[in-house]
Image (cartoon, helix red, strand yellow):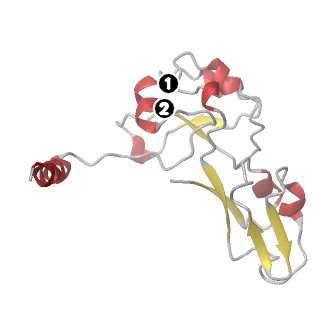
Amino acid sequence: MAHFLCRRLTRLWARRRPGTISCREARPPWAIEESQFLALCQRCGNCFQACPNGLIKPAAGPEYQDSPIAGTPVLDLDCGQCSYCGSCARACPSGALDLRYGRQVQTRVRIESSCQARQGFYCLLCEDACPQQAIKASPDGVTVNMAACDGCGACGLACLYGAISLVRQP
């Protein structure tokens, strides 16, 4: 009976709690769990400056305005590939990015219908660019080995057709 009552009270409390906003963009590598990340991140910008590829930017979308997410670092792989050098984590004074947790990859490849290989054309650009050899193009289309993919973004940069996007994994 106590278990049922506890579940019921939890559901009622969750309904009355104001809606929470979650970050829909990927965090930099080595980001700790999101609620802890938001509590620890000082929004100092050290990680932005430390990234040699300039891939870390502040979360600035209108949906983040006046929320704890505003100004926190997100990973932008539209213009470059992450080398997982660890500079961002070493520059973080608060521990929100922590090298002890290893690579905390939060992105995965999504291949759109505009993919030339999926349409039957010969194209190996993404396969050739993948440092992890996680992408295989064949006459049947393109397959991604998600266990091997490290979400670095090299394939998306190589695709001339814009058919590859990197999405945050839940």
Give the percent coordinates (x, y) of residue 140.
Answer: 80, 82
Which structural element holds mark 2? loop
Give the percent coordinates (x, y) of residue 7.
Answer: 17, 52
Relative depth, front residue between 8 and 39? 8
Mark 2 and mark 1 in contact? Answer it, CB < 8 Å: yes
Q: Which mark is residue 43?
A: 1
Sequence order check, earlier mark of 2 and 1:
1
Distance from label 2 to label 1 (Cα)?
6 Å
- Residue to which mark 2 is pinned: 71
Q: What residue sits 74% from the left and 54% below the top?
A: 148
Q: What residue sits 36% from the left and 46% below the top?
A: 21
Above or below for 143 versus 153? below
Q: Is residue 69 visible?
A: no
Callout 2 crowding tier (Cα within 10 Å): few <14, some 14–19, many ≥20: some
Which structural element holds mark 1? loop
Q: Which mark is residue 10?
A: none
Give the percent coordinates (x, y) of residue 107.
Answer: 62, 51
